């Protein structure tokens, strides 16, 4: 799919309709958008209107002239996976000779380098490995916690947690409690793709459902763990499915208040089994702005320089984003799909300052790191 299906609801060159003006007035007044208002803005509002509304909301939530980012590293503990998702260019099936499970020696080197570079956490994720017992993950977490007690472990994802629940005959809360006791601090929002079961049945049929993804997150929140929420869009979904996703996240956040941030990014099709063009920057910025307007209960919206590049990510700071994502010392999954941007801490600071903001490194829960690492 390109920017939208052939029957696209988008009206990029149309004048502002009456329903758009009404929805814009609600957003400008800081009132919650219902589905009809969100549709009016997403499908019909000009990009300039969306930018103005989203940036105004961002400034209401975060009036200080600051843009945050986290110092971390995305470490993939294994690329072996039985899911076979059509959008993934990173995984290898169990029988592949290219599969790996990271050694502790290699992991130690990666953690030590992360800390030397001023990082505070690691994002640890892998595939649905059919042969690793739950004790392997618990032992890994205990070793990380005991060896580097200052390290924040932001690890796994709802599909991994649900996979282990079914594989080991445990409830999701039991799996989460065991991992938390072993050292897990927080859960990233991976594996969300589009929270619509018909879409998931096409692109990731062996993964947990949308309802199961949300259930895992809510169970983590009940245990006091904070998590992020994500969206990968621009593959085989319709624009309406993206709104379904946003409203599902908002309803979940109303129940638990456990999401710290929302991170949307565009699907990268190279080397995958889904054949479509990458979405252009305006499609990304449109969705980002509507995300800020719909998700009135999620405090932070991240831009995605890893998929969109630094220039578009900088522009996103005026479309509702208040966070620049991650230093991302290492990233493998998006790179496997043919996109590989790299930014140093100095470059991130320069980009943020050029947009008129002060860069501040934060932790996972958005507490500023003290003292701030030197550039």
Image (cartoon, grey):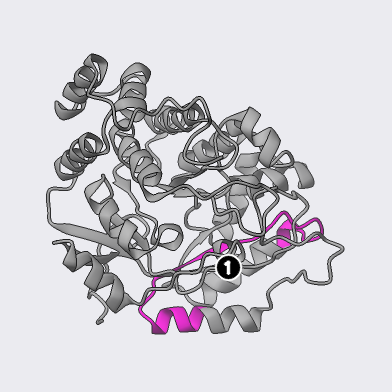
Magenta stretch, residue numbers: 111-135
Confirm whether residue 225 shows in the render. no
In magenta stretch: residue 61 = no
In magenta stretch: residue 116 = yes
For this orientation, the residue located farthest to the right is 95
Residue at 35 percent across and 29 percent down: it is 42
Q: Nearer the viewer, residue 168 or 81?
A: 81
x%, y% of residue 4?
A: 48, 35
Q: Quadrant of residue 14?
A: top left
Above/below status of 257 relative to 75? above
Which quadrant is the C terminus positioned in? bottom left
Residue 317 horizontal side relative to residue 63, left or right? right
- Residue bearing the label numbered 1: 332
Residue 304 horizontal side relative to residue 176, left or right? left
x%, y% of residue 90?
A: 66, 62
Residue at 34 percent across and 62 percent down: it is 363
Which quadrant is the N terminus positioned in? top right
Disc 1 secondary structure class:
loop
């Amino acid at each position: 799919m390109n920017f939208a299906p052939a029957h696209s609801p988008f009206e990029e060159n149309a004048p502002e309709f009456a329903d758009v003006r009404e929805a814009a007035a609600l957003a400008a007044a800081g009132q919650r958008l219902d589905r009809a208002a969100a549709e009016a803005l997403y499908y019909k509002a000009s990009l300039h209107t969306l930018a103005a509304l989203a940036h105004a909301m961002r400034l209401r939530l975060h009036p200080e002239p600051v843009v945050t980012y986290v110092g971390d590293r995305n470490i993939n503990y294994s690329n072996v996976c039985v899911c076979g998702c059509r959008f993934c260019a990173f995984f290898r099936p169990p029988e592949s000779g290219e599969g790996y499970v990271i050694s502790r020696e290699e992991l130690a080197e990666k953690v030590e380098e992360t800390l030397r570079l001023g990082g505070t956490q690691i994002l640890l994720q892998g595939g649905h490995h059919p042969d690793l017992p739950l004790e392997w993950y618990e032992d890994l977490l205990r070793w990380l916690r005991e060896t580097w007690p200052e390290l924040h472990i932001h690890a796994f994802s709802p599909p991994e947690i649900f996979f282990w629940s079914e594989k080991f005959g445990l409830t999701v809360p039991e799996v989460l409690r065991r991992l938390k006791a072993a050292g897990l601090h927080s859960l990233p929002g991976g594996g969300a793709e589009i929270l619509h079961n018909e879409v998931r049945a096409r692109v990731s049929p062996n993964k947990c459902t949308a309802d199961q993804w949300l259930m895992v997150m809510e169970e983590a929140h009940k245990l006091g763990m904070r998590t992020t929420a994500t969206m990968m869009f621009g593959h085989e979904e319709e624009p309406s499915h993206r709104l379904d996703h946003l409203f599902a996240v908002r309803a979940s956040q109303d129940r638990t208040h456990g999401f710290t941030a929302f991170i949307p990014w565009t699907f990268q099709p190279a080397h995958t089994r889904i054949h479509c063009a990458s979405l252009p920057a305006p499609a990304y910025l449109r969705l980002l702005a509507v995300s800020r307007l719909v998700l009135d209960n999620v405090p932070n919206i991240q831009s995605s320089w890893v998929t969109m590049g630094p220039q578009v990510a900088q522009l996103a700071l005026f479309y509702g984003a208040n966070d620049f994502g991650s230093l991302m010392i290492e990233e493998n999954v998006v790179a496997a799909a043919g996109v590989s941007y790299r930014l140093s801490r100095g470059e991130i600071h320069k980009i943020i300052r050029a947009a008129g903001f002060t860069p501040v490194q934060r932790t996972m829960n958005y507490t500023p790191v003290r003292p701030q690492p030197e550039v």
